[in-house]
Amino acid sequence: MPNTLGGGRARSLAFETLALHGTRENADKTGSLTTPIYQAATFAHLGVGRSTGYDYSRLQNPTRQALEETVATLEGGCDAIAFSTGMAALACLMDLFAPGDHIVASDDLYGGSVRLFTAVSGKNGIGVTYADTSSADAVESAIRPNTKAVFVETPTNPMMVVSDIAALAGLCKRRGCLLIVDNTFLTPYLMRPLALGADIVLHSGTKYLGGHNDALAGFLVCARADLSERLRYLYKTTGACIGPMDAYLVLRGIKTLPVRMERQQENAAVIARWLKEQTERGGALVTDVYYPGLDDHPGIEVSRRQASGFGAMISFATRDEAIAHGVLERVQVIQFAESLGGIESLITYPAMQTHADVPPEVREARGITNRLLRLSVGIENAKDLVADLRQAVYGE
């Protein structure tokens, strides 16, 4: 294998190979198998008007550049920009828009995104209309003359609603607005929104890309150079760049992304089927299961068409609030914690955690009740996870 995996050679390699080896464009001369951590804030100039290509780490750092090139290659974008967090990436993204602009967003959306749209974007004069993005008709009805973008999570957080990216991309092109897709849940291993017509992909790299619950990161991946140039200008101006240590950790995590995702979604399928069986029992303590890979999920055919898997996120509702609280108190292998996408299985209470800032009446209308739990399935043995859920649900 050549020392440099850039250009056409990189594009010809399989995803698993690219995730493991990256593009190697910034490999040093020592033969190190890992990208070095360039823990430097500033870099010396070679002379007047002469630079190594690195001047100040807010603008670029070799460790961060290696990460960005890897993510851009995996997503099929012309550029990837690495941020300190996913929310920092979203905040920079929203700076593309001006007072009086309008966006349409998925009506089931991560609570932090809703909080930013409400508390920051609204203050800055940017209007947001929430719509069911699984329906292209609903999205088109929400588009106004001043609509600049459609922002989509698919599957959504936490209700696992699936949107047809190709259909929305066609609509956005006809109506002259950007299509932005949050691909955190599926990652480029399972879905590549840019290939389906999206303009920008957003990631919380803290989640599956990093995969080990030990680093914060966010990404914007662009399909076009003009978008990259505008975002890079905002990025260097506002400065929410990822540090070299976190960049190194996310690069390390990406090396095992394919094998982690395969094990996690394999486990998720087992758990989703078990939870579904519980809904069919007399006096069921579990009443609803939301997982895109279940045969009765309304978005399963769209998922099959646009993705190569269903991911490892499951939400489920219990019969009453007391049962939900009992599950959270009794889990032992599964950890009661916020976040998702790591190798450890985590269970979250959206109404009190990820979506606490969403008005209660809005939460209720979208199914985010005090009975709803969200499960991020890890790489543990599936039998152990099912056994843990069984004793947590039934108090056995």
Image (spheres, rainbow, N blue to C red):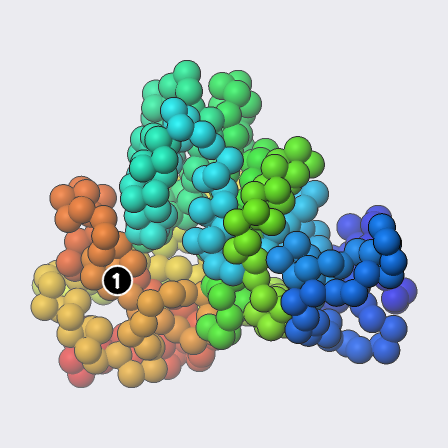
The residue located at (26%, 79%) in the rendering is 331
- Rendered location of residue 33, percent (x, y): 77, 76
Q: What amino acid type is highlighted by mark number 1?
A: Gln
Residue under circle 1?
Answer: 353
Q: Where does the C terminus fall, quadrant-wise? A: bottom left
User: Is residue 249 rendered to the left or right of residue 9?
Assistant: left
Q: Nearer the viewer, residue 83 or 265?
A: 83
Q: Is residue 319 above or below residue 175?
A: below
| Element class at badge 1 | loop
At horizontal 23% and vertical 48% (from top left) the residue drawn is 358
Q: Quadrant of the image for the N terminus?
A: bottom right
The percent coordinates of residue 129 (x first, y second) are 32, 31
Asked if residue 287 shows in the view, the reply is no
Q: Residues within 10 Å of mark 1 (few under 14, many from 20)?
A: few
Can you tell which quarter of the image residue 312 is in? bottom left
Q: Is residue 308 above or below residue 212?
A: above
Q: Position of residue 292 (x, y in %)?
A: 40, 51
Q: Position of residue 58 (x, y in %)?
A: 62, 58
Which residue is depicted at the point 22% across and 73% down? 328
* Whether residue 162 is visible: yes
- Comparing 304 with 335, the one in front is 335
